[in-house]
Image (cartoon, rainbow, N blue to C red):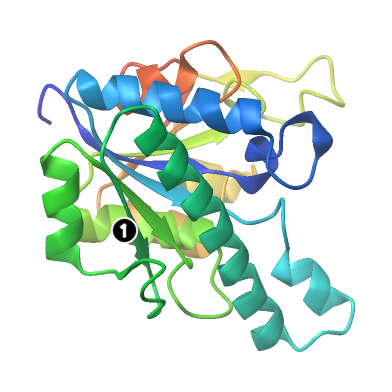
């Protein structure tokens, strides 16, 4: 692994919503962007995958009776809204950023190509990936794992509201125990809910480690982007 790894930040829509739970919290967005811009200035090589759950959650709509393909396509569009907001915020923070979409959406963003994304990342800019894999029935976690594999990333960084992976929900159980490290196979076997099986399998088969960290801690995203974050390391 190089001194500064090439990483993908998986940013959940729920975190970008802040305490409001839905929509975008401008203070949270600016804080995330400032940390990313600072990390880029210090040599980080970063791509970011935006979720869309703060705007629309396709699987929930499908459970309510909506056609699943339609619901997932709406969810893809929600990730583009978050991606546009992140690109704008990072640019305002003083760094270069480009938006890549999994389906054609010009002139809103560039259609994703591996070579162009690598150019942006390795030249010190942020590549923002939206639309998941571009297909229904796949989560944005799977989209993040896919981009990691394609781009030869060292780490998939999953920011959450807790400081790692626990054996049970630490919000509900005071005796929950945190893992410092575990394997992807152990994560799947224990059904720890870090990410879905497709995303986990993609990471395991392509030797991509996952770092689960608390996104709301001071400088958490900055440290994660430089590969020095605290949290739980899930190894391939």
Residue 66 drawn above or below residue 50: below
Which of the image's four quarters has the C terminus?
Answer: top left
Is residue 2 toward the left or the right of residue 63 in the image?
left
From the top left corner, tell me how far across and down residue 195 is, in percent. Answer: 56, 50
Is residue 135 toward the left or the right of residue 100 in the image?
right
The residue that mark 1 highlights is 147
Residue 136 drawn above or below residue 182: below
Total tally of numbered discs in the picture: 1
- Decide if residue 211 is in sight here: yes
- Decide if residue 210 is in sight here: no
Q: In terms of depth relative to the viewer, which is nearer, 13 or 133?
A: 13
Residue located 58% across and 43% down the image: 194
Is residue 158 toward the left or the right of residue 25 in the image?
left
Q: In terms of depth relative to the viewer, which is nearer, 49 or 106?
A: 106
Residue located 20% across and 57% down the image: 117
From the top left corner, tell me how far across and down residue 79 is, in percent. Answer: 56, 60
Classify residue 136 by image quadrant. bottom right
From the top left corner, tell me how far across and down residue 206 is, in percent. Answer: 25, 56
Residue located 53% across and 33% down the image: 159
From the top left corner, tell me how far across and down residue 88 is, in percent. Answer: 44, 44
Which of the image's four quarters has the N terminus?
Answer: top left
Classify residue 62 by image quadrant. bottom right
């Amino acid at each position: 692994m190089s001194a500064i790894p090439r990483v993908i930040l998986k940013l959940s829509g729920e975190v970008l919503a802040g305490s409001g739970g839905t929509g975008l919290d401008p203070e949270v967005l600016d804080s995330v962007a400032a940390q990313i811009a600072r990390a880029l200035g210090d040599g980080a090589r970063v791509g970011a995958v935006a979720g869309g759950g703060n705007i629309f959650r396709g699987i929930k709509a499908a459970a309510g009776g909506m056609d699943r393909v339609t619901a997932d396509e709406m969810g893809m569009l929600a990730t583009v809204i978050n991606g546009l907001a992140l690109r704008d915020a990072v640019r305002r923070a003083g760094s270069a950023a480009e938006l890549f979409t999994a389906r054609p959406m010009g002139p809103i963003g560039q259609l994703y190509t591996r070579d162009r994304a690598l150019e942006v990342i390795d030249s010190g800019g942020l590549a923002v990936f939206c639309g998941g894999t571009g297909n229904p029935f796949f989560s944005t976690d799977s989209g993040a794992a896919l981009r990691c594999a394609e781009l030869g990333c060292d780490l998939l960084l999953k920011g959450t509201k807790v400081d790692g992976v626990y054996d049970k929900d630490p919000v509900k159980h005071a005796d929950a125990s945190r893992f410092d490290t575990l394997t992807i196979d152990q994560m799947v076997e224990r059904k720890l809910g870090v990410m879905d099986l497709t995303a986990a399998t993609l990471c395991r088969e392509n030797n991509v480690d996952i770092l689960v960290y608390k996104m709301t801690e001071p400088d958490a995203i900055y440290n994660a982007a430089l590969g020095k974050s605290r949290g739980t390391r899930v190894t391939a």
